[in-house]
Amino acid sequence: MQDEIEGYGHFNNEKILIVDDNDTNLFVVKTILEDRGLIVDTALSGSEGIARFKHSGENEYVGILAKL
């Protein structure tokens, strides 16, 4: 699996927000993305994610990943 992850490239400290109600999912995804050079912010609920986004600076997050 590590070889597959290595093939996805590297980022330069761009910041993303991950929203998921499962701590294990957050830990795994955060670890993988931080290893790729992203700064990862997390939220455990949709309302927490919206609050984090509303209080973020303009263009602070380059992306938001949410469990649907």
Image: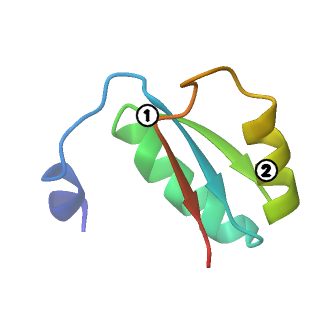
Give the amino acid at mark 1.
Answer: Leu
Name the spot of residue 61 as percent of width and height, x first. Answer: 55, 33
Residue 21, placed above or below residue 6: below
Three-letter code, disc 2: Ile
The kind of secondary structure element at disc 1 is loop
Q: Residue furthest bottom?
A: 68
Q: Is residue 29 left or right of residue 27?
A: left
At 33% across and 39% down in the image, what residue appears? 36
- Mark 1 to mark 2 CA distance (whole Å): 20 Å
> Where is mark 1, residue-wise?
38
Q: Report the side of 19 relative to 48 (left or right).
A: left
Regarding mark 2 in the picture, which secondary structure is present there?
Answer: helix
Q: Is residue 53 above or below residue 58?
A: below
Q: Residue at x 73, y 72 (%)?
A: 22
Locate the C terminus by quadrant.
Answer: bottom right
On screen, residue 54 above or below 27: above
Q: Earlier in the sequence, mark 1 or mark 2?
A: 1
Quick check: 59 left or right of 51?
left
Q: Position of residue 66 (x, y in %)?
A: 60, 65
Residue 35: image location, x then y, percent: 39, 39
Residue nearer the viewer, 23 or 49: 49
Q: Quadrant of the N terminus?
A: bottom left
Is residue 41 something that shows in the picture? yes
Residue identified by numbered label 2:
50
Q: Position of residue 57 (x, y in %)?
A: 68, 20
Badge 2, how many Cα within 10 Å: few under 14, some, many 20+?
few
